[in-house]
Image (tube, grey):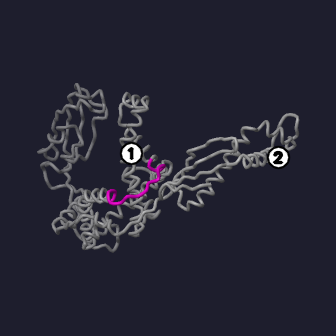
């Protein structure tokens, strides 16, 4: 056996499996089969070895060759002494009179020597500031969002008020089906009703009845009403208005869901939230620059199989953008298919390269993402999308996306830390 180290990420195991070794394996496998074999004219387990060898010839040969290749691979990996990170590939299989010559490519995690020069990739950054006015404005919005609805002392309806109305709708002189309601609360200016309806209510007085004419939009959901003119008889029963919550400790307790929260706690929370939003805006373009710099700065060996896997992902995404005719033309033309893959080869290499660099830097900087953090991210993502968290986890698991998500979170935490440190210097 010979181990040819192509580079720190790719190795070639060369070996010759002798004919004698193969024959020994065949005999051994045939004896194992004979213990269970069932052939006409023989009792189970009593089939002669010669008959087994003849009847199961192809199966015995396949198993013998497979076992011999696995032994070569296992011995070779021990000598290579690296973390195998992709399925090894048999690149040569040549049967000769005296045995079989095989060559197996093995892909291992590359050696990466990361010094402190990566910090040169982090650009200067000034952390944004948050003014007291911004905090106060945000707290006013919170108070508004937690407002209570109360009956207004107004007698005339204005935009922004809540009109409690009783109405009936008519089309072609006939009362509409599902076109009436009693004491229905409608916020004026919300756009919840047909265009023009709310505007015509402005200025009405409590107890007043008014006829309103509108036209249903052409794309209205109920086709029988789309584009038709309608008349509504509307009575204003009551005017309500939203009264913002008082800005005090009670607001803080409700909003932060903490019994001992104070207004000062709420201010600090809001200030930090605004700061995080601003930092995200400032950091976003700088992160791209850091990643581009890291790819250029470090030259590392890349496992060929991993690059090909990444290339397959890119090709799949790019192919989805093509028209059926364009896709067919590429698939039926080997030269064009080769050219199409080559077009994205460097992008695949850069992505794989960056993955290994980020992984090495994260270890150096002590950046980790626990399973609990991962679960929490998936949980919140599911809530935002209105989905069942268990369904989202299942989707990630079935599509092998958990490692990708984890790597993305590690990258995000790493870049944030580097930029924070640079900003605080």
Say what secondary structure mark 2 lies in.
Answer: loop
> Of 67 and 201, which appears nearest the observer?
67
In the drawing, what numbered circle is on residue 203? none
Residue 277 image position (x, y, % from top left) = 26, 61
Residue 270: horizontal and vertical position, in percent?
25, 66
Q: Is residue 366 magenta?
A: no
The percent coordinates of residue 401 (x first, y second) are 45, 51
Q: Residue at x 20, y 67 (%)?
A: 126
Left or right? Give the position of 57 relative to 104: right
Q: Which mark is residue 345?
A: 1
Name the side, left or right, on which 241 lies relative to 7: left
Give the Cα separation between the discs numbered 2 and 1: 52 Å
**Which residue lies at the image location 38% right of the left edge and 37% below the top edge?**
339
Q: Is residue 159 above or below residue 52?
A: below
Q: Quarter holding the N terminus?
A: bottom right
Is disc 2 surrounded by few (<14), some (14 to 19) or many (20+) residues within 10 Å? some
Q: Quadrant of residue 96?
A: top right
Is residue 296 highlighted in magenta?
A: yes
Helix, strand or loop status at disc 1: helix
Residue topped by disc 2: 35
Q: Earlier in the sequence, mark 2 or mark 1?
A: 2
Q: Which residues are magenta?
A: 294-307
Quadrant position of the C terminus in the picture: bottom left
Residue ranking furthest to the front: 97
Is residue 379 visible to the viewer in this orientation of the structure? no
Residue 275 in view, yes or no: yes
């Amino acid at each position: 056996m010979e181990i040819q180290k192509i580079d720190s990420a790719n190795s070639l195991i060369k070996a010759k499996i002798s004919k004698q070794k193969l024959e020994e394996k065949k005999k051994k496998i045939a004896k194992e089969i004979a213990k269970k074999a069932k052939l006409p004219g023989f009792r189970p387990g009593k089939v002669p070895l010669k008959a087994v060898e003849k009847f199961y010839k192809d199966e015995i040969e396949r198993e013998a060759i497979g076992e011999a290749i696995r032994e070569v691979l296992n011995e070779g990996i021990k000598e290579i002494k690296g973390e195998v990170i992709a399925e090894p590939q048999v690149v040569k299989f040549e049967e000769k009179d005296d045995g079989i010559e095989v060559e197996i490519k093995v892909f291992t995690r590359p050696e990466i020597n990361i010094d402190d020069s990566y910090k040169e990739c982090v650009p200067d950054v000034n952390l944004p500031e948050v003014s007291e006015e911004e905090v106060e404005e945000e707290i006013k919005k919170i108070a508004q969002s937690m407002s209570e609805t109360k009956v207004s002392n107004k007698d005339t309806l204005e935009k922004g008020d809540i009109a409690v109305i009783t109405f009936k709708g008519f089309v072609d002189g006939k009362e509409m089906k599902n076109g009436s309601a009693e004491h229905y609360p409608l916020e004026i200016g919300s756009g919840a009703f047909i265009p023009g309806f709310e505007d015509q209510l402005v200025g009405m007085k409590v107890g007043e009845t008014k006829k309103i004419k509108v036209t249903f939009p052409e794309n209205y959901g109920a086709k029988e009403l789309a584009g038709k003119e309608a008349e509504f008889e509307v009575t204003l029963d009551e005017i309500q208005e939203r009264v913002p919550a008082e800005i005090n400790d009670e607001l803080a307790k409700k909003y932060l869901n903490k019994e001992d929260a104070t207004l000062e706690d709420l201010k600090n929370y809001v200030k930090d939230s605004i700061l995080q939003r601003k930092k995200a805006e400032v950091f976003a373009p700088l992160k791209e620059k850091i990643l581009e710099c890291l790819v250029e700065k470090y030259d590392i060996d890349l496992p060929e199989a991993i690059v090909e896997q990444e290339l397959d992902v890119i090709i799949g995404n790019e192919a989805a953008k093509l028209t059926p005719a364009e896709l067919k033309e590429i698939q039926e033309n080997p030269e064009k298919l080769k050219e199409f893959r080559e077009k994205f080869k460097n992008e695949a290499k850069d992505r794989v390269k960056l993955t290994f660099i980020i992984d090495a830097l994260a270890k150096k900087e002590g950046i980790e993402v626990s399973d609990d953090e991962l679960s929490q991210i998936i949980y919140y993502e599911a809530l935002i999308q209105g989905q069942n968290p268990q369904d989202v986890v299942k989707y990630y698991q079935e599509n092998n996306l958990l490692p990708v998500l984890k790597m993305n979170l590690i990258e995000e935490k790493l870049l944030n830390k580097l930029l924070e440190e640079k900003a605080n210097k």
